[in-house]
Amino acid sequence: MSISRRNLLLGGAALAAVGVLGGTLLLNGNEALASVETGAQAPAFSVQDASGATRTLAEFSGRTVILEWTNHGCPYVRKHYDSDTMQTLQRDTTADGIVWLQVISSAPGEQGHLDAAGARARVQTDNAAPTATLLDPSGAMGRAYGARTTPHMYIINPQGVLVYQGAIDDQPSARPASLQGANSYVRAALADLAAGRLVQTAETVPYGCGVKYV
Amino acid sequence: MKRLLAAIAILLGLAGSALAQSSLPPAIERNVEGSLHAARAAIAPGETFTIVLRQNIREGWHTYWRNPGDSGEATELTWTTPPGYDVGAIQWPTPEAIPFATLVNFGYHGEVLFPIEVTAPANARPGEQVTFTAEAYWLVCSDICIPEEATLTFTLPVATQGRDDPQWAPRIAQAVAGLPRREEGVEARITEGAPARLSVVLPNANSIRNVRFFPYSRDVLLASGPQLPRVGESGVSFDVAGGVATDVGRAPLEGVVAYEASDGRLRGVEIVAEPGDPIPGTDGAPAPMSSDYPLAELEGASAPAAPVSMDALGILIALGLAFLGGLILNIMPCVLPVLSVKALSFAGGAHNGEARRDGLFYFAGVMATFMALAVLLLVLRGAGEAVGWGFQLQAPWVTSALALLFFAIGLNLLGVFEIGGSLQNAGGSLAQRGGSAGSFFTGALAVIAATPCTAPFMAGAIGVALTQSAAITLLIFAALALGFALPLTLLHFAPGLQRLIPKPGAWMDRAKHVLAFPMFAAAVWLAWVLAEQAGPMGVLSLLLIATALAFVLLTARWGRAWLIAGALVFVVTGVFTWRPLLGVQTETVLASEPWSAARVAELRAEGRPVFVNFTAAWCVTCKVNELAALSSPRLAQGFAEANVAYLKGDWTNRDDEIAAALAEHGRAGVPLYLYYPSNGEPQVLPQVLTEALVLETIAGAQ
């Protein structure tokens, strides 16, 4: 009987035990989808973007930040990109000095998941104009914000307060025709902010595909 | 605890789900086959008849109800009709709740018929053919979503005398009969509040299960939120929460209450809840849910009301899982050391014949102990304790007790204390008797000693077992025992295998020490569960008790005086901290509102006296003062009589406004108590408060 076999047995047993517990913790960790109240401080995050840089909410302090949960395979996201609606909104807002962050919370192997190179290529393909594309394959950021659908939009004011969350517009449909006459909640909220008013419609029910979490 | 069980169930279920996963459909194929059908083979001028949109949905995919829930989109039809014909809206059958990851959607599986009413004009000419065309659009989803479009048509002849289509008339009639609609005697009320309470009078409330409310509006509730359905003798109640609508409880709330009727069919009744007080008799017990109800976990599945009968295959699977579970128990952290040590005790030099006999007796010991546990459970169930079982596992005190147990076991494994007490000695001396009796008690001891570790894991088996008949319960426990006993018994019989067992030595201590850490991790996890159940106060109590427990365990072996001192510390700690762990809410009789300078000014402008308490969770003096001087009903009465507003400034987290207010009164920290009489300057109260002083202050200043 060698020492190594002994150690192997022991190590194996300990690993199994730790594994069972760890797995349990992980599985449990996956369940919770938080929600942030409109008017509350937006949760801090620290996430890699598609260029490999770590982005935090703190670095954008003093600027308005828009978060856009996205999944390029989702028909609702396609409606907004194939019609150039989303890109136009991105260009209009970033031109005003607003920070636009796309967030991809699809888990590896799920629809919409992209690695850094894939995310950069997708921005090219879509001719999109976000400030950055955040990669959240663990879903930690998505869960902290309670992101439920793609698209799901959040607006954070320069003080870091969440001032809008919900749908991108009032047409909960994947049909391209629904874009005609759609009222953009995001544009309306930004107009309120620009005018120094309270955001009139500060919370709506998001629509789209479910976020493909781990 | 429930989540732990769910996690285990998932682990065990992995194998099954891998088998169940079918191959993906080819991309070009449609996921929904759609068609239109009329109940009439010919229509008469002026008559109203029913047509249906039929969706045949691929297995594993679903389409949506009028309110799709958290995501998705309802089916749409855009009609082109002959002039004069009037086509009504889609009438929606009762939806199912379809959970996906963290979301819940409302929709349909399999074949669905959506009735639509059509009215022919009075001047329709008999003999002509009329064609209806619908541009259909639906979103169909499994884990991904695909929008599909189709052009659907049907053509009907107009005749002087209409007649039914023999194939479709009965099917459509059945579909129409199944639609949710208003029913005689069904009333509903919605309260304000978060959660708001929806109460519904349902004549058949006692014979239904899997009941859920589906609102027509997406805004009134969070589709994936629990509704915690309850039933009483006259109806059901639901929690309504999480929506973005701000007028819940002030506007009528429309939707469908769906349930599984006693015949197993999905039924629905349309309700319009008027704002008002809850209807009495609608929230007795948690509403029953079937074991296959997809939202059972979301709703915190109460134990099924009646034993659910299992078919033979189900029993076999349960037995197999119990056996596997028993095997796994052998490597559970607190069982493995026990067993390794036991294994070592006979590995040294027992003759084969003797070893076999020992093996058999060990086996018998394990089986007998498990059977005894099973019988105990059956007796408890007979005594009506079964209903309480699931709730017990959710109770904060059980979570706390388990956390303390894991913590103590960890300390024991680290050698902080030895179990010098009667249990192991009794068991140990019995076990050391040698021979048959010794082996028998080794088996029994292994089961008993293992209970702390295995209890959470066995709870799953117990849960299943308790819903079954006594015979099946015993069988499941027997399978569990077999799995548990088998590895060590085999060792007795196969001397060759014994070579695999490590020899005793210093490594045993090291192993014990290493195994202490999974125990601590388990305790940490349970503390986190407790945080959700009992909040920060619960966790504080648990950690204090754990500290006292560690103290008494450490000191107990230093002799009687230390034991008494340690026990005293433990008891005193327990006396002061047990309340949150038993779920007893310390009544906050004196209601406070958050402090702000503006609020103080506002209240003073109204002429009200104001009492301000600047406090923080980490400030011990503050908490002592709050308990001693600011929490009695008498004080609350005093405040009420003098119409004093009570504001609390919580400085637990950094807050510049509060810091400024403190500085204004020459303080750099909390506590600070301020009393603003209805007129005059504010008074600063001492940092150590008594109730009498507070009462005097508010009385004297009037």
Image (spheres, rainbow, N blue to C red):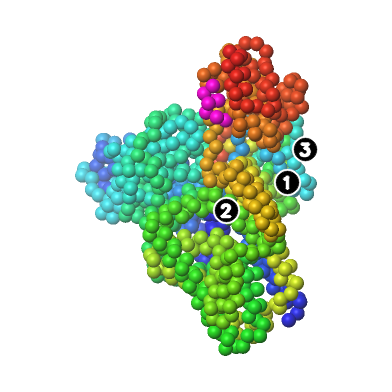
| Tag 3 and tag 1 share a subunit | yes
Q: Is residue B145 left or right of residue B344?
A: left
Tag 3's secondary structure? helix
**Residue B464, relative to residue B345: is it above or below?**
above
Q: Name the amino acid type tagged 2.
A: Ala
* Residue furthest out toward the left: B161
* Residue furthest out toward the top: B679
Identify the residue under disc 2. B401
**What is the number of the mark on residue A59?**
3
Tag 2's secondary structure? helix
For mark 1, name the chain.
A
Q: Is residue B622 left or right of residue B462?
A: right
**Residue A14, relative to residue B550: is it above or below?**
below
Q: Name the amino acid type tagged 1.
A: Val
Task: State the quadrant of the N terminus of chain A.
Answer: bottom right
Q: Is residue B303 left or right of residue B489?
A: left
Residue extent of the magenta highlight: B631-638
Q: Name the amino acid type tagged 3.
A: Glu
